[in-house]
Image (cartoon, helix red, strand yellow):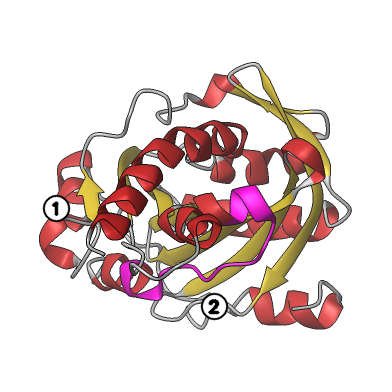
Amino acid sequence: MRAIAVRRTALAASAAALALLATACGGSGEDDKGDEGKGASESTAAAAPAAKALTAAELEKAALAQSDVKEGKVATKVAATDDIAKDQVKSEDAACLPLAHAQAGVAQGEPAATVKRSYTGEVKKPSKDTKPEDALLAALDTDKMLINLASYEDGGAETAFKGLTAAAGKCAGGFTATVSGEPMKVTKVATTAAPEGGDEGAAITLTVAADEGVQAPNKLVVVRKGATLVTFSVVNLASAATGEDFEVPADVVNAQVAKLG
């Protein structure tokens, strides 16, 4: 989900949270060079022949499905508000554009084929003895994820991965972008421990300036497996409201990476 829409979504979700609350009551890394080294895994197959790009149909089979997760909801059709086209994303600094694309769920570079998915975590029902303000925040503690699978010809996946990880280093001090004409101000970019399971992987946190002075974390995870690059753009509604950190649902990432073979 786009960072610029997160605050609106959090407000909209408040109604659902209040309904849950009423039901419950009715029953009674540092971003230095060292981190950058941990953020992107080294490829061990640099000398191997370029892998074959998957077709759109093959990507559909490799994309996350509802049966692949134990909880939450996987959507095979991304909501129109989150299905952003490449030309709708712009950055004042061209070097940071790969990060803006990834955050908006847009594929890197010029893929041969691409497929999108979205994932929404389970809404946690508060216990009946939870304080009202805590219950509301707990009900907003939901992860939302945009997943983009893209396949590339002639080593394009490796190039796209390198471009994205390089942007994380160049834009560590932040950048300004627009998504569908709406501004997004990123104040900091930091790399964290890379995911496993692919030929290359990276994890990146964008700190986004939200309403009322909140600095909201937006998480990016990127994994290359052969000629396929999969990016995960993850937000948490409670974190968007408070600025507190959150963990990317590793089981969802692992399930998707496993399907790449």
In the drawing, does residue 68 fall left or right of residue 173? Answer: left
The residue at the point 82 percent across, 43 percent down is 213
Asked whether residue 244 is drawn in magenta, I would say yes
Q: Is residue 5 visible?
A: yes
Q: CA distance from mark 2 to mark 1?
A: 25 Å
Q: Is residue 44 above or below residue 166?
A: below
Which residue is at a point 29% across and 59% down the rendered structure image? 24
Label whose residue precedes the other's in the sequence (2 or 1): 2
Relative to the observer, which residue lies in front, 165 or 155? Answer: 165
In the picture of the structure, the residue carrying the numbered disc 1 is 61
- Residue 142: x percent and y percent? 42, 56
- Is residue 167 a member of the stretch shown in magenta? no
- Residue 9: % across, % down: 48, 35
Span colored in magenta: 239-252
Question: Which residue is located at x 81 percent, y 77 percent?
Answer: 30
Horizontal arrangement in the rendering, residue 132 relative to residue 219 (left or right): left
